[in-house]
Amino acid sequence: MDIRPVQNDKQEPVPAEIMYADDIDFIGKKDADVNSIEKTLKTHCLKVNVDKTEHTSVRKDSEDWKTTKKVGSLLGSKEDIEHRKHLSKIAFNKLTNIWKSKNKTKQKTKIKLYNSLVKSVLLYNCGTWALTKTDEDRLDSFHRKQLRNTLGIRYPTIISNASLYKKCREAPLAWLYFPSAWFIGSVKSRDSLDNSFSF
């Protein structure tokens, strides 16, 4: 970004130009390095909004940094997954009337609405997650539960996971959004489930 230099040091009541930058991160190995940034920026006629400035320390003896939010996501994978689940539940519940309407809204329309308004919330910034197999299984289980509720499938009605994916034209989230996971588990089990539905 090209920023024109300030021509003089004269302080005017209303600045001729206001330049704004948001979500800028400065990383340092020592607290002193980070604390000196404000003074350095001042020499370039740049002002830091102290009230909106957040300081995060990543240390081995503390996990507080995992709950720090950056661009809508928490830094800790597990923490962010739970946060996204919570937000997707809220988004899902706002559409309860649509999910419950059996004759007014077609199944295909419900799935489109779910994918665009709920699943997108659940998987926001999911590419930053470091998932274990347990995390993947829990995420897929949560996803299937929402799909069942979208279609109004509740106990005692039973549907297998493979049939549910086929009915919704979906697949386990790990296959769609975390392709590296394909090579970690059993390829054979993936192939067997692949054969049970198609897109």
Image (cartoon, rainbow, N blue to C red):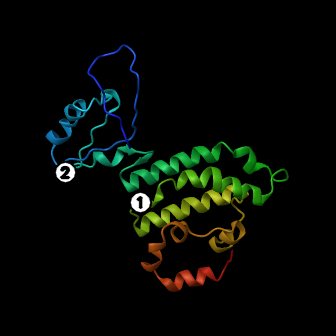
Mark 1 or 2: in front is 1
Query: How far across and down, in percent of the image, does residue 105 sit?
Result: 81, 52
Question: In the figure, 196 relative to 116: above or below?
Answer: below
Which residue position holds label 1?
129
> Residue shown at 35%/44% (left/top)?
68
User: Dot 1: few (<14), some (14–19), or many (≥20) neighbours within 10 Å?
Assistant: some
Viewer-proximal residue among 190 and 44: 44
Point out the image quarter for the N terminus: top left
Residue type at tag 2: Asp
> Residue shown at 55%/59% (left/top)?
142
Q: Residue furthest top?
A: 13
Point out the image quarter for the C terminus: bottom right
Disc 1 is placed on an element classified as: loop
Q: Please state if 46 lies on the left or on the right of 43 as rendered.
A: right
Query: How far across and down, in percent of the image, does residue 137 sit?
Result: 49, 67
Q: Please state if 88 lies on the left or on the right of 156 as rendered.
A: left
Q: Please state if 51 lies on the left or on the right of 104 as rendered.
A: left
| Sequence-wise first label, 1 or 2 | 2
Question: In the figure, 158 relative to 117: above or below?
Answer: below
Marks 1 and 2 in Cβ contact (< 8 Å): no
Query: How far across and down, in percent of the image, does residue 4 sit?
Result: 35, 35
> Residue shown at 67%/60% (left/top)?
148
Which residue position holds label 2?
61
